[in-house]
């Protein structure tokens, strides 16, 4: 579990990024941390990982304070950053020198995920493309079986088939003891795999809901006109409208993540108000 | 694959894992560096052999010179993970404490390096000894207990600590910036020593930098070598430099976390 209470942080003294930010993320779920560029997603990830320290407030990850940076804390999460450098060694050597630091690392799972991504274990890391390196790091991160997996823009650099494999692997790897946080601004890439959505805007959590709740309250429909009173948000697409409406019947509709995100970040969002 | 229990705050096993990680990641650089050093020695010995092989009997000097030079390179390149933001992040997220990370680098650049280099040099020396015997050159085996070799170890530890701190401090070309800092500090110490000596002597005459040497012959009226103003900085330099710079290195790693 990740618990953030009254977090205050800013890169500059007179410009706060987070002001009394509160957030609770529970195990057994995949969270989509969404936000526009510069909204503070990566900074929040770094705070959680103990790579940046809050000016005020507290973060608890799996019962540990990231600020203490104890080995136990560091082995309770794995983070796949947006950009990273890999050592100039073979994948086998990388496995040999890095995996032992993670007590629950499962080599069979690692090979399984690599195979899903169609990567061979007999490769040199430096010879891989950025996307391939990302696949290796994602496979490694999942195989560590750490209680928390943080991934920052994990689909950047992945080709379209790999994005689909990524979704499949993430969905299969989650269990009641783990918590995945996927930070992205490419909301379509995480459609269908996340259990809850957290939207960050200008350093504030403006939306934090389980998709089940979203589904209970909202309907996503394609309409020919938008003269319906129940419409909370709509976007014109050629001759039709993609709309979010108050849910009136029992029928669940497919959540259009991009539409939901756009509706949330709109000023005076009716969608956000619907949940308050 | 055996994993470790990470509940303990300090673990020797984690230190060994960190050292193994360093060894794997720096293997290429170490092999190139050592090949260069021994290649250079081979060239010197080859040309010396053409002129009678005078230097074939100076294996202690070769050993110490190679030890200090390659050791400085190894120490200066120790924290390669701090060269970029991405690598620093990876390094900081690795499940080990700052103290363990520091100790692993310290042990790698002192004990592990010393043992590794000595074994390599011994093998090289054995080869030169056999070649020397075959071609009638005055070859000798190094003597590790020689007083100059032991002094070399002491100087190495001092330089190792400085270059280790430099590698944790300077993000880019740490070897160059540390060397430059050492040079500037050396000049400052020299000026300071001249001031102290002038103070002891009472005047500055006959003190040319080229022949500058503080001993009892230079100042017969004062026991310069045992004067507290000379002894204190001297012992401070010999015995406090390394611990001081190791401490600096530790805090520099801590600083990267914040």
Image: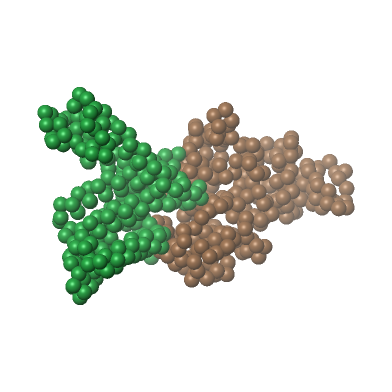
Front position in the image: B43 or B5: B43
Residue B188 in the image: x percent, y percent?
32, 34
The residue that appears at 29% across and 57% down in the rendered structure is B66
Regarding residue B202, the answer to whether it shows in the image is yes
Q: Please identify the residue farthest to the top as the structure is shown.
A: B202
Asked whether, in this view, residue A170 is left or right of residue A251, the answer is left
Residue at 35% across, 41% down: B183
Residue A139 x %, y %: 52, 62
| Nearer to the camera, B247 or A147 | B247
In the image: residue A257, left or right of residue B147: right
Q: Is residue A120 above or below residue B109?
A: below
At 49% from the left and 45% from the top, the residue drawn is A49
Q: Is residue A242 left or right of residue A206?
A: right
Residue B34 appears in the figure: no
Q: Position of residue B31 (x, y in %)?
A: 37, 63
The tint of chain B in the picture is green
Q: In percent of the image, x 33 and y 51: which residue is there? A: B72
Which of the chains is brown?
A
Between B133 and B91, the one lying in front of the other is: B133
Residue B21 screen position, x and y as percent: 38, 58
Q: Quadrant of residue B124?
A: bottom left
């Amino acid at each position: 579990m990740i618990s953030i209470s009254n977090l205050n942080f800013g890169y500059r003294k007179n410009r706060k990024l987070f002001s009394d930010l509160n957030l609770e993320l529970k195990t057994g779920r995949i969270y989509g941390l969404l936000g526009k560029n510069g909204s503070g997603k990566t900074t929040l990830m770094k705070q959680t990982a103990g790579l940046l320290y809050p000016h005020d407030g507290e973060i608890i990850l799996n019962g540990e304070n990231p600020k203490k940076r104890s080995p136990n804390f560091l082995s309770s999460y794995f983070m796949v950053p947006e950009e990273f450098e890999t050592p100039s060694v073979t994948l086998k050597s990388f496995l040999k020198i890095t995996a032992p630091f993670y007590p629950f690392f499962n080599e069979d799972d690692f090979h399984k995920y690599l195979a899903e991504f169609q990567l061979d274990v007999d490769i040199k890391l430096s010879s891989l493309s950025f996307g391939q390196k990302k696949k290796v790091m994602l496979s490694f991160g999942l195989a560590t079986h750490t209680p928390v997996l943080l991934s920052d823009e994990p689909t950047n650099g992945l080709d379209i088939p790999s994005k689909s494999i990524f979704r499949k692997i993430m969905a299969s790897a989650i269990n009641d003891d783990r918590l995945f946080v996927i930070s992205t601004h490419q909301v379509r890439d995480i459609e269908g795999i996340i259990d809850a959505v957290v939207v960050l805007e200008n350093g504030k959590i403006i939306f934090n809901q389980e998709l089940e709740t979203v589904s209970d309250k909202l309907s996503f429909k394609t309409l020919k006109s938008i003269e319906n009173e129940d419409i909370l948000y709509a976007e014109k697409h050629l001759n039709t409208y993609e709309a979010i409406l108050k849910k009136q019947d029992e029928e669940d509709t497919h959540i259009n993540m991009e539409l939901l995100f756009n509706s949330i970040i709109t000023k005076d969002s009716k969608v956000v108000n619907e949940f308050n | 694959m055996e994993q470790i229990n990470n509940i303990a705050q300090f673990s020797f096993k984690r230190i060994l894992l960190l050292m193994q990680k360093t060894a794997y990641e720096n293997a290429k650089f170490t092999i190139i560096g050592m090949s260069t050093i021994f290649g250079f020695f081979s060239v010197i010995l080859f040309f010396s052999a053409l002129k009678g092989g005078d230097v074939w009997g100076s294996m202690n000097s070769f050993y110490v010179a190679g030890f200090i030079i390659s050791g400085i390179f190894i120490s200066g390149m120790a924290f390669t993970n701090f060269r970029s933001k991405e690598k620093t992040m990876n390094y900081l997220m690795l499940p080990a404490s700052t103290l363990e990370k520091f100790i692993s680098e310290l042990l790698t650049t002192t004990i592990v390096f010393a043992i590794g280099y000595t074994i390599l040099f011994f093998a090289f020396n054995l080869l030169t000894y056999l070649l020397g015997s075959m071609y009638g050159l005055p070859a000798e085996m190094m003597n590790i207990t020689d007083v100059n070799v032991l002094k070399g170890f002491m100087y190495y530890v001092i330089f190792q600590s400085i270059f280790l701190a430099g590698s944790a401090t300077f993000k880019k070309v740490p070897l160059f910036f540390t060397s430059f800092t050492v040079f500037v500090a050396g000049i400052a110490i020299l000026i300071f020593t001249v001031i102290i000596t002038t103070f002891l002597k009472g005047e500055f005459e006959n003190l040319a930098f080229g022949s500058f040497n503080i001993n009892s012959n230079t100042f017969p009226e004062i026991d310069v070598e045992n004067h507290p103003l000379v002894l204190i900085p001297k012992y401070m330099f010999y015995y406090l430099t390394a611990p001081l710079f190791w401490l600096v290195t530790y805090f520099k790693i801590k600083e990267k976390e914040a």
